[in-house]
Image (tube, helix red, strand yellow):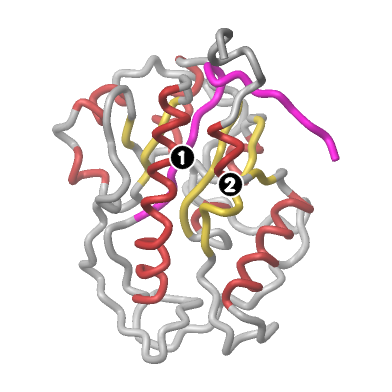
Amino acid sequence: METAEWKASETAIIICDMWADHPCKLAAHRVGRMAPRMNDVISKARDRGVAIIHAPSGGIQLYEDTPYRKRIKEAKPAQPPVKIQGWCYLNPEKEGPLPVDDTVKRTDGPIRGCDDPFPTYQPNHDRHEHPAIKIIGYDVISANGQEIYNFLEQEQRKNIVLMGVHTNMCVLGRPFGIRQMRYLNKNVVLCRDLTDALYDPRDKPYVSHTRGTEMIIEHIERYWCPSILGKDLTQVIPGSDNPAS
């Protein structure tokens, strides 16, 4: 197993789609359970100099008049080495098929992979970021791939930690997600205990929701990037954080 040491000053955390609500109620329940732990991790990482990017896609307009939007919109424009895509679909040249079937819909609307007994599509659910996750200080808010790239380049952040939901969909596919960040030659890791998949055990390969999420994480580790635990973002090399300790 390889070990890499990242400087906090060169690292950013991107929080993907941790909405206050979700059309899939079991998914929303798991986000609510995860959010306080995520906030604890990003709070400690922030104190050590890691940049925090909040990306509640579809809800950015709710924050338009905040300093967190202003800060990222004012980042110096940067030319990416490749096109930033609106969505990065599964790439058969770089990865195998996903290990779970997340294509099944059991309701009208776009919801796939929902494990609610009777999914109900709600197009106007609350897309604020979950209130347990604090937006504060020098944090920024964006779901725009170019804005985020501009900010990363301006702040010289070459190391990216992805956390949030959903592992098999937005965490991989968004214009700030794992695939796009790898295309942009960033060093990327997935925070594997602060993510969750949209997978229904009624669908192939007929495993528990937890195991389905694990299988997707294993897919990412095999084809795209390593993973870490949240606690890894709260620990530093002895002596580098507080030489007197």
What residue appears at the point 57 percent right and 51 percent down from the top-left corner? 88
Q: Which residues are magenta?
A: 1-18
Q: Amino acid at mark 2?
A: Cys
What residue appears at the point 38 percent right and 43 percent down from the top-left corner? 39
**x, y (%) of residue 84?**
52, 38
Residue at far top of view: 244
Q: Earlier in the sequence, mark 2 or mark 1?
A: 1
Residue marked by disc 1: 41
Residue at far left of view: 65
Mark 2 → mark 1, Cα distance in angstroms? 11 Å
**Neighbour tally class for label 2: few under 14, some 14-19, many 20 plus, Cα within 10 Å:** many
Q: Amino acid at mark 1?
A: Val
**Neighbour tally class for label 1: few under 14, some 14-19, many 20 plus, Cα within 10 Å:** some
Residue at far front of view: 245
**x, y (%) of residue 219?**
73, 59
Q: Quadrant of the N terminus?
A: top right
Mark 2 vs 1: CB contact within 8 A = yes
Residue marked by disc 2: 191
Relative height, residue 1 to residue 127 (above, below): above
The quadrant in which residue 98 appears is bottom right
Relative height, residue 57 to residue 161 (above, below): below
**x, y (%) of residue 115?**
47, 82
**x, y (%) of residue 75?**
36, 18
What residue appears at the point 43 percent right and 47 percent down from the top-left corner? 38
Reply yes or no: does residue 17 show up in magenta. yes
